[in-house]
Image (tube, grey):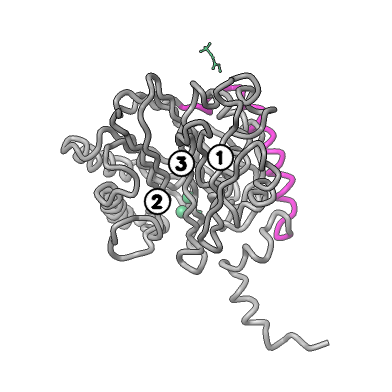
Amino acid sequence: MAEKITVSVIKADVGGYVGHSSMHPDLIATAEASLGKAKKAGTLIDVHVTRVGDDIEFIMTHRHGTDATVVHELAWNIFVECTEVAKKLKLYGAGQDLLSDAFSGNVKGMGPGVAEMEFVERKAEPILIFMADKTSPGAWNYPVFKMFADPFNTAGLVIDPSMHDGFNFVVMDVMKNRRITFSCPEEMYDLLVLIGAPEYYIIQSVHRKSDNDICAVSSTQRLALIAGRYVGKDDPVLIVRAQSGLPAVGEVLEPFAFPHAVAGWMRGSHQGPLMPTSFDSANPSRFDGPPRVICAGFQLADGKLVGPRDMFDDPSFDHTRMMANYIADYLRRHGPFEPHRLPLEEMEYTTMPGVMEKLEDRFEKV
Ligand code: 13P
Ligand code: 13P
Ligand code: MG
Ligand code: MG
């Protein structure tokens, strides 16, 4: 059997510049130098460091499989190293996502977001890495459903015989730490009942039915559930493989032409449109947003990351961005009112408990 390759995307917010809006170049340079050493030493086949807003993202290829301690520890140590640089520059929220003092085998549950997949590289292997800031993992539910289950989005579901049987969706119940698999199209309506509530149910991965090959995987780590309080939003990542029996690159990108509403934005407590932008425009500043998504495209060549291509650097997404700005205006005018502000359950990890405690004695029984 051909040797498998692993793609790992591990990200964290280790300090914002300025505020939560963007990333200081020194952090990128620090990470590039250290990950470069790991590549030279043979731990990694290849690596690309990038960022969206205030989140630094390590895109790595290697042969250690998913959940490999060697890769997770490497990423953790470099986040710690970048945090030191961030502290010197007094960047905002230095070390924000490092919720633990010491590494314990796997970065999952320690703050960073992780998406990893292992597969046999095909003759041509286009992969798309989506990275978002000012939102949370459920933000991928809508686009991933569209890519792999909606024939109005993905023509291949109808006209490509190798996709016609559909895909399996693994959904994580993040509140109860359990998961369930749905077979689509047959169980599409059951799937939608769950994933329509993206703060509770998150699509973790998608698999082709014919051979169970992995097609997409997302980060499902929710910071507030790990920390038990609000510590910044768990800005998510998503890896998608494309073409040859999978959705075409353009079918994978198409769901993002609609700037759907996601949770996040200011203080992680608001609904806002997810705006697809070029790498250069991924600096959420208006009301700390609106939420951003970038997409780095690569062709894999024996694990080498040939790329990236800046996939949303395309005028055909201009109209989406304009629509996102209209929606942003509309929502902003609600100020502190729902549905701009998140519903109470989601406010639980922000100011709500403190305010309620203060007011408790002043409530009169009626
Ligand atoms: P090509 O004919 O350029 O390979 O395109 C096929 C395809 O998949 C378009 O999405
Ligand atoms: P981040 O989760 O990107 O750090 O943003 C936090 C925030 O409070 C923005 O207003
Ligand atoms: Mg931040
Ligand atoms: Mg962020």
- Rendered location of residue 286, percent (x, y): 59, 46
Residue range corresponding to the magenta coloring:
310-337
Is 334 colored magenta in this rendering?
A: yes
What is the secondary structure assignment of the residue under circle 3?
strand
Residue on which the image places disc 1: 168
Residue 83 visible to the viewer: yes
Location of residue 94 by image quarter: bottom left
Point 45% across, 49% down: residue: 18
**Circle 2: residue type:** Ala
- Quarter location, residue 157: top right
Q: In the drawing, what numbered circle is on residue 24? A: none
Residue 169: percent from the left, percent from the top? Answer: 56, 42
Q: Circle 3 sits on which residue?
A: 52
Camera-side mark, 3 or 2: 2
Mark 3 close to ligand 4, CB under 8 Å = yes
Q: Which residue is mark 2?
A: 12
State which tag comes first along the sequence, 1 or 2. 2
